[in-house]
Image (cartoon, rainbow, N blue to C red):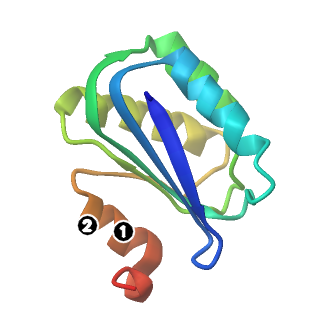
Amino acid sequence: MPASYKIDRERRLVFSAASGVFSVADALSHHEKLSNDPDFDPSFSQIADFTQVTRFELSADDIQLLAQNGLFSANSRRALVASSEVAFGLARMYGTLRELSGESGVHVFHTLDEAMQWVLGDNAAS
């Protein structure tokens, strides 16, 4: 499965993960499933782990399309985890476009630990 998610209502967190070849269709499908999940709340934070993606099939236009379709609230903390330079660059592009739309809580990290610490703070270990 190219993209999946788990919702932790107690920590108000969505943990998304992608693997293999990841395309705009995968991202849009993930977005639709999440938005229709009764446990989802747009004010939750998100950690999106792209470290297991082997290839991205996304153009600059695809990133722009995804950035225009914000699912989370403007104040949500969203950590994108990218281990490769390509993934890091795509994530930064997405974050910049979201910032231009008024969202200030998108940050990109190289490790899951850094992302967890930023999103959850003192609750990261629990």
Q: Give the x, y percent position of residue 75.
A: 66, 63
> Residue at coordinates 56% horizontally, 45% vertically from top-left?
99
Examine the rendering and report whether any part of residue 46 can be seen: yes
Indicate the quadrant containing the N terminus: top left, top right, bottom left or bottom right: top left
Most foreground residue, 103 or 66? 66
For the question of whether residue 70 can be seen, the reply is no
Q: Nearer the viewer, residue 65 or 24?
A: 24
| Residue 66, horizontal then vertical, whole percent | 60, 27
In the image, which disc is placed on residue 116?
1
Residue 113: image tag: 2
Asked if the residue under mark 1 is in contact with the one under mark 2, i.e. CB atoms within 8 Å, the reply is: yes
Q: Quadrant of the C terminus?
A: bottom left
Q: Residue at x 58, y 40 (%)?
A: 98
* Most distant residue in the left direction: 84
Mark 2, Cα crowd under 10 Å, few <14 / some 14-19 / many 20+, is few
Say what secondary structure mark 1 lies in: helix
| Residue 122 position within the rendered picture, expressed as x and y whole percent measured from the top left | 39, 88
Give the answer, above or below, for where 65 lies relative to 116: above
Q: Position of residue 84 (x, y in %)?
A: 18, 34
